[in-house]
Image (cartoon, rainbow, N blue to C red):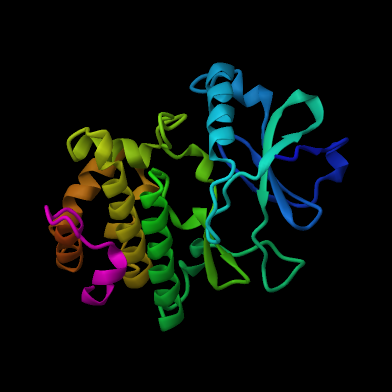
Amino acid sequence: METIKVGTSEEFGQMLGHGSEGEVFSYQGKYAIKVFPNYIWRHQPFSLKKLNRKMKKIEAMIGLEDPNVTFPLGFAEVPDDEKAYYMRQVTSNNPAEKAKTLESFKYELFDEEQEEILIKADAVLQRIHKMGIASGDIRDANIALQDDKEPIFVDIDNAIFEDYPFDIIPERAGALYQLYGGKATAFQDNDKLLFAMMALHLKTKDDRFNWGQDRDIIDEGVRRLHATGEAKEVLECIFSDALDKPYIGKVFQKI
């Protein structure tokens, strides 16, 4: 496990993304480094104790491999003694641009290429589930597109893995976790439901499926979803008792 040493912040390339936990920067054109600023993690709901546990989970995930997931490759030493790790960088067809994500499809007409990308992404979701991982933060912004066409799951460090829980349970997972019985084993089903809802929204542009925009009505939105004809069959497949219950890819043509 090689540690990358970054002398100054000027060595970083463009910012690739940022969220409530930290920021992601390009590094040498082939790596992405996620930095967890101390000023964020000193405050609730974050804490340095939780950050240390996150870094232990990241260490446990180093060595996991999948061509369509940006698993941690190693740690990074960065200025100001902040915690950081690096992963491979997802690239665009245009080297001067950041890679697109599924989020970029929101305002485009749905076509066969997008459907193929979603079915490929569903196959990736199946593989990480077989590794014992539950993402809990499935959304269009967290599925990047290598060369604008190959789905790559990013921001995987917040997932449940082995005996490490979510660092901070995402509200998307938390609401569904409560709604579907509060069983830890249900988190992978939650991933599948979230993915199905995202796919339905991308395909239909029906905002009944875009419940994540207003987190105060998540539970109500999911319950309403059960009453919509387009989603009902898909949800029944996902939450059936069958041992081989399908992921969205196998039922996508029913939508």
Image location of residue 181, percent across then percent down: 17, 35
The residue lying at 41 percent from left, 34 percent from top is: 162
| Quarter occupied by residue 76 | top right
Asked whether 102 or 132 is in front, the reply is 132
Report whether 119 appears left or right of 224.
Answer: right
Image location of residue 107, percent across then percent down: 47, 70
Image location of residue 199, percent across then percent down: 35, 64
The residue lying at 55 percent from left, 52 percent from top is: 65
Residue 187 is a magenta residue: no
Asked whether 229 or 91 is in front, the reply is 91
Q: In which quarter of the image is the C terminus?
A: bottom left
The residue lying at 28 percent from left, 62 percent from top is: 247
| Quarter occupied by residue 98 | bottom right
| Quarter occupied by residue 253 | bottom left
Asked whether 217 or 237 is in front, the reply is 237
The residue furthest bottom is: 112
Q: Quadrant of the N terminus?
A: top right
Report whether 64 appears left or right of 115.
Answer: right
Report whether 147 appears left or right of 134.
Answer: right
Image location of residue 86, percent across then percent down: 68, 43
**Residues rendered magenta in the picture:** 238-255
Q: In this picture, is 237 found above or below 194?
A: below
**Number of residue marks:** 0
Residue 246 is a magenta residue: yes
Asked whether 19 or 1 is in front, the reply is 1
